[in-house]
Image (cartoon, helix red, strand yellow):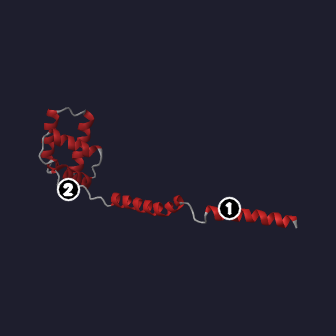
Amino acid sequence: MNRDLLGQTRMGEISRQFREEGAGAPWTSQLGFILIPLAAVGVAWVIYRIYNRPRTPLNTPFGMLAELCRAHGIEGSGRRLLEKVADRAELEQPACLMIGPGQFDRAVAAATGKGRLHARDRAKLERIRQRIFAS
């Protein structure tokens, strides 16, 4: 009997403490129900913005050169080298490099006269020339 009374007393104390503290959850836990969906929407919006960026316009001088380089399979350092040649040769439209071998050679000669092109650059330009104008 003493055990039953002790169990009931202990349960009564716990019950009273629970009622005194209140049955509701603290406001910080309720805040999570608002912040978690807002964070999910924010992350989804950022991902949407990253993947739906407009492409670089092709109607810029270097944009056209980049598109032509992509069409000919010239990537990275080769494209940058052609941009450097077009800049040093002071071409108004860098895509003129790809009109014909004569224009390409004149631009490379002008760029060589205005600034130093290393031997490895000249060798790379020769490979690019063969790739563009190969028949």
| 121 left or right, relative to 111 | right
Q: Which residue is mark 2?
A: 58
**Pointer 1 and pointer 2: residues touching (CB < 8 Å)?**
no
| 67 left or right, relative to 1 | left
Q: Nearer the viewer, residue 63 or 30?
A: 30
Instruction: Determine whether the residue tagged by mark 2 lies in a helix, strand or loop.
Output: loop
Residue depicted at x 27% and y 44%: 78
Q: Is residue 2 above or below residue 113?
A: below
Q: Amino acid at mark 1?
A: Gln
Residue depicted at x 69% and y 64%: 16
Q: Is residue 75 above or below residue 2?
A: above
Quarter holding residue 109:
top left
Q: Which mark is residue 64?
A: none
Q: Nearer the viewer, residue 31 or 106?
A: 31
Q: Amino acid at mark 2?
A: Leu
Residue 133 coordinates in the image, percent (x, y): 20, 50
Q: Is residue 90 visible?
A: yes
Q: Earlier in the sequence, mark 1 or mark 2?
A: 1
Q: Quadrant of the N terminus?
A: bottom right
Residue depicted at x 80% and y 64%: 7
Q: Is residue 127 visible?
A: no
Residue 127 coordinates in the image, percent (x, y): 25, 44
Q: Nearer the viewer, residue 101 or 52?
A: 52
Residue depicted at x 21% and y 40%: 84
Q: Which residue is mark 1?
A: 17
Farthest residue toward the right? 1
Residue 116 coordinates in the image, percent (x, y): 20, 32
